[in-house]
Image (cartoon, grey):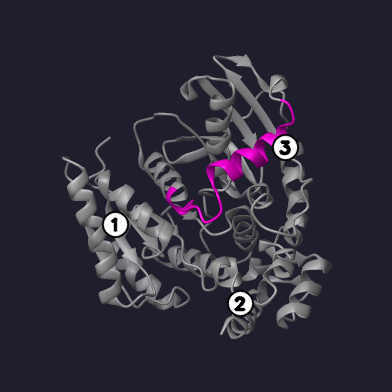
Amino acid sequence: MNHMDKKVLIFGAGGRVGLYLTEALLRNGIEVIAVDFLNQAELEARINRVIIDSRVSTFSQIGQAIIYGDVDVLDEARLIEILKKENPDLVVNYAIPFTWDAAKKLPNYERISASGLGAFAAVQALAPKIIAQAIAKSNPSIPFVIGNLPDITIPIIHGLATHINLVKPIAGAGNVGLIEASLRATIAKDQNMDVNDLTLYLVCHHVHWVVPREPGYPNDAPFMLKVLHKNEDLTSKLGDLRELMNRSITTCYEPGAGFSSTTGLLASRLVLALLDDSNTEHKMHTPAANGLPGGYPVIVQNGKIRLNLPEEWQESELVKNMKEVHKSDGVEGIGSDGTIRFTQKAVDILKEEIGVELPIVVPPEDLERVAKEQIRVAQAAVE
């Protein structure tokens, strides 16, 4: 497919994942609208570096970049202005007002980690909510992909969409894809097989990626894995699947590993598949397909996503398990209207360690207030 006539808007384009995604799309001839809170000069310098690298490394024509610096992703009016002017074919968000990298600078990080990434769900969902509103008010037919904590944020946004005018995000990138890639590589090495002869079906949550890398997480969250080698079921011969998954993650993503490059490539695969109107079936793993909690094997075809499960797997049971995994990440549950209910453990830890007064229940009308207060307190603790 010729992508030269396609435009993708990336919020957070100047960040680590955003830059990898920008480069991958440019190399495929996509026109990228790069938007970030960085000042115009800094963002131009980063994007131009990517453009030069892309031109040096490929003989084909690369896409163009339109750059918007100094953009607050929480400024809905500004987002609507950009969306109406550029009218992209797809929008991706990697902009986060307070990142987990920043959280790692907080006092007693090991204790804070035990509260779970989901303890910051309101913060993570805030920018996607505002972007989804802006898309709805500018061109509601634009597909929306969320990169930040999609296993949790996308179900929240889908819930909010039941009573707020916003666009439902179609899927996320990374997480389950990161784990599937590491499992595929490890199994191929362990079994002395060609990686291309393996087919994996994996249902899991970003918690499974975090468990062997961060302190404080219980290592008992449910997941499902089936591995085929040339259509022969290999799963029962792989031993302890949880040990295999943990080992695969720590081997492929060592401490300090730049996993954002893998996430960026996975995001580009999803974006290119969504833009492909040739009726081709693209098989991959994505988080939160069509608003489901957790990550799944999927097929992307003609701008739509559907689950790609073995016949013996029941979607309802898988979804139930993924909702249960939320609890390992500080989220007791997500209501059908987007209400977030946090675990008591997460509430207690954040109050004790950094003084955040996180409510047990955050209804939709309180999301923005709670998120901004959490950002304020956490940023003050870092400083």
Mark 3 to mark 1: distance in Å? Answer: 39 Å
Tell me the residue that label 3 is attached to: 242
Q: Quadrant of the N terminus?
A: top left
Is residue 42 among what the camera can see? Answer: yes
Q: Mark on residue 368? A: 2
Instruction: Kindly state the secondary structure of the residue where label 2 is placed.
Output: helix
Mark 2 to mark 3: distance in Å? Answer: 37 Å
**In the rendered structure, which amino acid carries the disc numbered 3?**
Arg
- Residue 116 lies, with reference to residue 380, above or below; the image says above
218 and 372: which is toward the camera:
218
Q: Badge 3: how crowded within 10 Å, few (<14), some, or many (20+)?
A: some
- Of the numbered discs 1 and 2, the one sitting upstream in the chain is 1
Residue 333 as seen in the image, left or right of residue 129: right
Residue 348 as seen in the image, left or right of residue 192: right
Measured from the top left, where is residue 76 in percent x and y?
45, 75
**In the rendered structure, which amino acid carries the disc numbered 1?**
Val
Front of the two marks 2 and 3: 3
Q: Quadrant of the C terminus?
A: bottom right
Mark 1 to mark 2: distance in Å? Answer: 29 Å
Identified at 52% across, 19% down, the residue is: 193
Q: Which span is picked out in magenta?
A: 239-261
Whether residue 104 appears in magenta in the rendering, the answer is: no
Is residue 176 among what the camera can see? Answer: no
Whether residue 259 appears in magenta in the rendering, the answer is: yes
108 and 331: which is toward the camera:
108
Instruction: Kindly state the secondary structure of the residue where label 1 is placed.
Output: strand
- Of the numbered discs 3 and 1, the one sitting upstream in the chain is 1
Front of the two marks 1 and 2: 1
Instruction: Kindly state the secondary structure of the residue where label 3 is placed.
Output: helix
Please tell me in which quadrant of the rendered image residue 73 appears: bottom left
Tell me the residue that label 1 is attached to: 32
Identified at 55% across, 49% down, the residue is: 254
